[in-house]
Image (cartoon, rainbow, N blue to C red):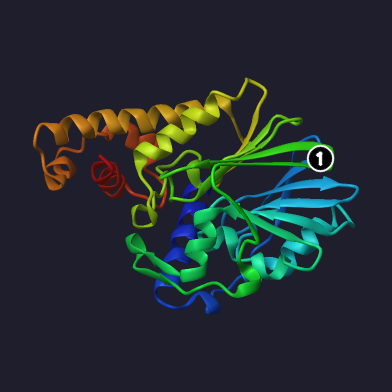
């Protein structure tokens, strides 16, 4: 089993466990939190769930996403190896529980929780991720973002100029890309599943065309030295994100042509029009048939 497949299978299992009401029983005891230097004072932390971006500063730290609630003690311990300062800011890239689950554990009088407007709205009401029949209960008050923004947020902290840009109707309806301008680092959230077909949450206002638009927008601001933190997968760069973008564009073009010709979703699945891409991107938890469904329903 490839590392890529193993990681994506773990993510799929986590999503399915929530739909069965088993999230609280999921065994996180064997999960290890690792860290990797990215650039400047920025690190990427990995464990189970979405990748965490961490900016370390003398006056405190900033986190982008925080994985699952039961992992919070391990994440805090991992941060403690890099900094003795508290987490001052937590910025969520979207509302999904593998990115916001630790919010309540990191929130304090000294910490400000930040997200796009729709992230708070969806966390406040709870909802359903229909692809996995996952019922998500309303978040606890302490887990909710306290500062929200509609389109753009700028934060100047720890010697870094940070910009969060909302990307409407992409992975969800509340995604944000986070740019660390001084260090030339970009955290893409789940707009980028490295090396695999991405999960697009249509039931939360997402669309494949929106993902493509978001990725194109991010690429336009990168150079060849930009470091890219994906929502899932290993540390990346502009060239690899460009390959991912090309996959998105090809998928939309090919499936769009078939849909315009009057082909049904079942017709498209039988035709297997993305066979050439499946070898490179079809080894994740989103299998080729489901990816075709995401694309078809987005057009």
> In the image, what residue occupies the spot 72% across and 67% down?
107
Which quarter of the figure has residue 160? top right
Which of the 4 quarters of the picture holds residue 92? bottom right
Q: Residue furthest top?
A: 224
Where is residue 292 drawn, in percent x and y? 26, 43
Q: Residue at x 44, y 60 (%)?
A: 12
Is residue 43 toward the left or the right of residue 212 in the image?
right
Q: Nearer the viewer, residue 182 or 289?
A: 182
Find the residue positioned furthest to the front.
150
Say which quadrant the C terminus sits in.
top left
Q: Nearer the viewer, residue 211 or 235?
A: 211
Q: Say how many tags the image has.
A: 1
Residue 29 seen in the current view:
no
- Crowding at dot 1, Cα within 10 Å, few <14 / some 14-19 / many 20+, comes out as some
Q: Residue at x 70, y 70 (%)?
A: 105
**Can you say whether 209 is above or below 143 in the image?**
above
Question: Residue 231, percent across and down?
Answer: 55, 47
The kind of secondary structure element at disc 1 is loop
**Which residue is drawn at the image coordinates 79% and 56% (left, top)?**
88
Image coordinates for residue 95, horizontal then vertical, percent: 52, 58
Residue 87 location (% of width, % of height): 79, 58
User: Is residue 221 among what the camera can see?
Assistant: yes
Along the line of sight, the residue nearer the viewer: 243 or 201: 201
Residue underneath mark 1: 41
Q: Is residue 23 left or right of residue 283?
A: right
């Amino acid at each position: 089993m490839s590392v890529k497949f193993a990681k994506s299978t773990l993510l799929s299992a986590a999503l399915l466990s929530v739909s069965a009401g088993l999230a609280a029983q999921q065994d996180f005891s064997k999960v290890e939190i690792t860290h990797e230097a990215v650039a400047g004072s920025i690190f990427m932390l990995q464990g189970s769930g979405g990748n965490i971006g961490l900016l370390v500063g003398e006056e405190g730290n900033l986190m982008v996403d925080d994985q699952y609630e039961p992992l919070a003690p391990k994440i805090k311990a991992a941060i403690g190896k890099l900094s003795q300062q508290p987490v001052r800011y937590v910025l969520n890239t979207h509302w999904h529980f593998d990115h916001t689950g630790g919010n309540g554990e990191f929130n304090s009088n000294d910490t400000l929780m930040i997200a796009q407007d729709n992230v708070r709205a969806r966390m406040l009401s709870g909802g359903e991720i229909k692809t996995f029949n996952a019922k998500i209960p309303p978040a606890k008050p302490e887990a909710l973002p306290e500062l929200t923004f509609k389109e753009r947020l700028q934060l100047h902290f720890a010697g870094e100029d940070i910009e969060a840009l909302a990307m409407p109707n992409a992975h969800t309806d509340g995604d944000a890309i986070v740019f660390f301008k001084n260090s030339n680092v970009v955290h893409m959230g789940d707009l980028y599943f490295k090396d695999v077909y991405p999960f697009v949450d249509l039931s939360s206002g997402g669309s494949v065309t929106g993902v493509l638009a978001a990725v194109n927008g991010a690429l336009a601001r990168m150079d060849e030295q930009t470091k890219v933190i994906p929502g899932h997968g290993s540390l990346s760069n502009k060239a690899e994100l460009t390959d991912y973008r090309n996959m998105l564009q090809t998928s939309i073009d090919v499936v769009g042509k078939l849909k315009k010709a009057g082909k049904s979703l079942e017709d498209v699945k039988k035709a297997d029009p993305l066979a050439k891409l499946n070898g490179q991107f079809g080894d994740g938890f989103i299998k080729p048939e489901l990816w075709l469904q995401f694309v078809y329903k987005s057009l």
